[in-house]
Amino acid sequence: MASLNPLQGTLGHRRAALLLRRTSFRYTKAKVDEMAGQTAAQALTSLLQIMPFKLPQPIYSPYDPQNPNVVNIKTWCLPVGTALPAEDFVLRRWVMTWWLHEAMNDPGIGHKMSFFWHQYMITTIQTAGNTHFFDYLSLLRWGTLGNFKKLAQKISLDNVMLRYLNNDQNTKTKPNENFAREFFELFTIGKGPQVGPGDYTNYTEDDIVQAAKVLTGMRANLGRNISDPQTAIPRGVFNYNQHTPGDKQFSTRFQGKNKVIGAANVAGMENELTEFVDMIFAQPETAKNLCRRFYRYFVNQSITPEIETDIIAPLTNLLISSNYEIKPVLEKLFQSQHFFDADDSDATDEVFGGMIKSPLELAFQTISFFNIPIPDPMTKPQQWFNFYNRGILQRFLGGANLPLFFANDVAGYPAYHQEPDYSHQWFSSSTIIARYKLGEMLLTGKLSFGENPDTNLGIKLDIVNWVKTSGSISDPKDSYGLVKTLTDYFMPETVDSDRFDYFHVNVFLDNLPANDWTYEWQNYLSTGNATEVRIPLERLVKAILYSQEYQTF
């Protein structure tokens, strides 16, 4: 029986590593070691936090009447005296690289959850420009661990969302149902099984028609001169002249009766929107839909009848009783026996290694574990930008089929929503080169594949220096301990003896005696010549990063 009962005792290394991998893009040995001695509740105290930004925000926000749409990039990203690029498609790359930098350096769940909301309520950065996409990202951050119901209402007035799903073209004389449809199907309640013509269990086609009328007259405000009073983030506006007046009657799918909503003037439009959202969130299926998405994002993508009954249902009840506050639900899930696969006799069958890492997790958790120096954006802004833009965004994420912030489907990136494969879609004939080239990219400091593979990546892993100075390897001359440390921290489960011997004996030692490694390491320390120790270390790192175990988490 799957159980949400809290896990007892300290986490230990294995469970601490799982919790950190699943909740953060940043993965370090020091953090795993710290959490290993904590209970799940203690570990979550630091993980479930929205941490301050590492860098200044790249866009002035909220609206500054003296600088209405001014980009703040040149004060910290561009070399002194460099003019800002005139084209928005260039400027938006600075916003994207800023987000990537913050994500990789965020020790908590903040950016992992922001990306969850981005996938849940998808838009693209080219829809309305870099400034407005920054506002969209700011709204997701505001709602990261807050209230789902409030976030859903506020996303309805986000300037990018209004344009992306065409709701700023939704008028009383020419209704557009795009946003209304996706608000039901993707953002909130979900369709449910179709039970009749135009009837999807949770709502009907007629409900979409009525919802579109509720949402008429909401307009993007690209001047950014009106902000939400609660978030201080620029938002769209209500235009009653384009709004469908009168009552909108919904089906008995809502509260078992024909719910009627209406607004008599512009002041009533926001109240009408609130009443519409209240109507949807009064349905338990809205909470259940979100909890299923949490489960597939953080735990496992297979929801069995047992999981539906023992995990999803009680989390749904908690979400409703918490008035759609998100944090209590995540705390319950991340402290549970089920999350750590400790609720049955087989502690290896459901969670550990149960999902394939996204390209973001694969790249950032590797880079952060080795603590590879990133160019300083304050002193080397162009090198910093090139690493994130050319190396991460274009070459690695692009090659691994994660076109970050350029999803080509209103449902988001397929690996998060397309049944039955889900995360297995990250691993295909078209993505395998990028995923398997990650180790080579980091060790050579080159782009390594695709066009101009010899171009500098912008960072490079000096594996010899890392083994010598990082403190992660307690005794570098001990080949067994060195390999054991790397496999223990990089693999979701402890590898069996045969698999360990493959990494230790076949790959690292190249079938030579362990004493040979001890001699070579001591010789390196004496002479400073790292040639003979670099070869086996790089061979080991590549083999681990290429391994099927490392692709999962």
Image (cartoon, rainbow, N blue to C red):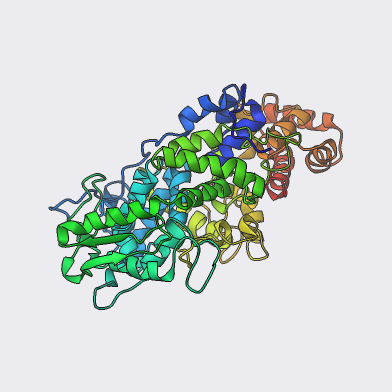
Residue 551 point in image, percent of width and height: 66, 49
Residue 528 vertical placement versus 363 (above, below): above
Residue 416 point in image, percent of width and height: 55, 56
Q: Which sits in the foreground, 297 or 74?
A: 297
Residue 460 point in image, percent of width and height: 56, 46
Split into 4 quadrants, where in the image is the C terminus?
top right
Residue 338 point in image, percent of width and height: 63, 36
Q: Which sits in the foreground, 372 or 276?
A: 276
Residue 17 vertical placement versus 546 (above, below): above
Does residue 154 appear left or right of residue 120 in this picture?
A: left
Q: Which sits in the foreground, 480 or 425?
A: 425
Q: Which residue is drawn at 28% across and 53% down?
A: 274
Report the number of numbered marks.
Answer: 0
Q: Residue at x 76, y 27 (%)?
A: 478
Q: Which residue is drawn at 68% across and 34% down?
A: 343
Quadrant position of residue 181: bottom left
Visible residue check, residue 108: no
Quadrant position of residue 538: top right
Q: Which residue is drawn at 66% across and 50% down?
A: 304
**Residue farthest along the bottom direction in this orientation:** 173
Does residue 338 appear left or right of residue 81 in this picture?
A: right
Visible residue check, residue 537: yes
